[in-house]
Image (cartoon, rainbow, N blue to C red):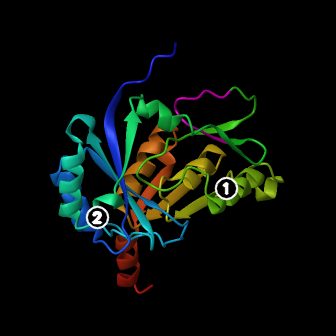
């Protein structure tokens, strides 16, 4: 006999077609939602939003988590009325109790780039002789190595670190423009670059870059710049 996992939350999912996202979000939180997320229903690409900008996909799905004990038929009709949609549009799913931190981290494993460079989450250890390991966890800032452009840049850095002496990174100053998590600057420093400058328009990205650099013992060789300030300074100097 297998014991059933305890159900403590209910997920209510809704396709936002024709609905106001902010109004639906407010209705869910007013009704007692514990958390709310948006996902893409059609795999549409959108440009990265500016800091503080809230941008959704053309076909967006909203999912809200509620305590199981408050969700019944009357609750669903009341929520649908608050959102101004038919109750039949609400998809209700029981959520099993789990250790969500472990569920999330399970999908993030060490990744190899080129010959010797690895990006490794903090919950993993890597025993690879000669490997250059950057310790990095997913966070609010973009960049863990999974995006194709990031992967190409990491592979290039690894190739430069293993190239002929005249092309090596040891004397290089690396500029990471749009640094996000700082993964490229930190990888370059871990591979032997002399120094790195990290630029981003988002202060959260600069904070993440500094934190990640500290974790990888390269903070003394990393300097961060907020893009808007740097551009203003350059314009003031006649650049």
Give the position of the C terminus as an image quadrant. Answer: bottom left
Circle 2 crowding by C-alpha within 10 Å: few under 14, some 14–19, many from 20: few
- Taking 166 as reference, is 140 left or right? left
Query: Residue drawn 19% across and 59% down?
Result: 27
Q: Which x, y percent locates residue 4?
A: 44, 22
Distance between the alpha carbons at the discs numbered 1 and 2: 45 Å
- The kind of secondary structure the magenta stretch mainly shows is loop
Magenta segment includes 123: yes
Query: Residue drawn 42% across and 29% down?
Result: 98
Circle 1 crowding by C-alpha within 10 Å: few under 14, some 14–19, many from 20: some
Towards the viewer: 67 or 126: 67
What segment is highlighted magenta in the picture? 118-126
Q: Which x, y percent locates residue 226?
A: 38, 65
Towards the viewer: 227 or 83: 83
- Taking 66 as reference, is 143 left or right? right
Of mark 1 and mark 2, the one earlier in the sequence is 2
Instruction: Give the label on residue 151, or none.
Output: 1
Looking at the image, which residue sits at the far top? 1
Please say if the residues under marks 1 and 2 sit with CB atoms less than 8 Å apart.
no
Towards the viewer: 140 or 210: 140
Instruction: Give the label on residue 220, or none.
Output: none
Looking at the image, which residue sits at the far right? 164
Query: Residue drawn 47% across and 30% down?
Result: 102
Magenta segment includes 102: no
Secondary element under disc 1, as helix, strand or loop, is helix
Q: In this figure, which residue is indicated by the disc labeled 2?
A: 86
Q: Which x, y percent locates residue 116?
A: 75, 41
Q: Which x, y percent locates residue 125?
A: 61, 27
Query: Residue drawn 21% across and 55% down?
Result: 77
């Amino acid at each position: 006999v297998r014991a059933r996992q305890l159900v403590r939350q209910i997920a209510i999912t809704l396709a936002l077609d024709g609905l106001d996202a902010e109004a639906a979000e407010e209705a869910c939180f007013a009704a007692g939602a514990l958390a709310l997320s948006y996902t893409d229903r059609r795999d549409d690409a959108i440009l990265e939003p500016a800091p503080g900008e809230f941008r959704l996909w053309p076909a967006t799905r909203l999912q809200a988590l509620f305590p199981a004990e408050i969700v019944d038929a009357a609750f669903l009709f009341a929520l649908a009325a608050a959102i101004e949609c038919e109750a039949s549009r609400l998809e209700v799913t029981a959520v099993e109790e789990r250790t969500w931190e472990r569920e999330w981290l399970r999908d993030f494993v060490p990744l190899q780039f080129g010959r010797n460079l690895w990006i490794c989450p903090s919950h993993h250890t890597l025993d690879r002789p000669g490997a250059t390991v950057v310790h990095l966890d997913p966070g609010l800032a973009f960049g863990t190595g999974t995006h194709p452009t990031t992967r190409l840049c990491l592979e290039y850095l690894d190739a430069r670190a293993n190239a002929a002496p005249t092309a090596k990174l040891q004397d290089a100053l690396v500029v990471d423009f749009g640094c996000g998590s700082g993964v490229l600057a930190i990888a370059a420093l871990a591979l032997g670059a002399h120094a790195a400058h990290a630029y981003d328009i988002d202060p959260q990205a600069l904070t993440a870059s500094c934190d990640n650099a500290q974790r990888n013992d390269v903070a003394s060789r990393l300097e961060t710049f907020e893009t808007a300030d740097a551009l203003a300074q350059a314009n003031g100097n006649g650049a």
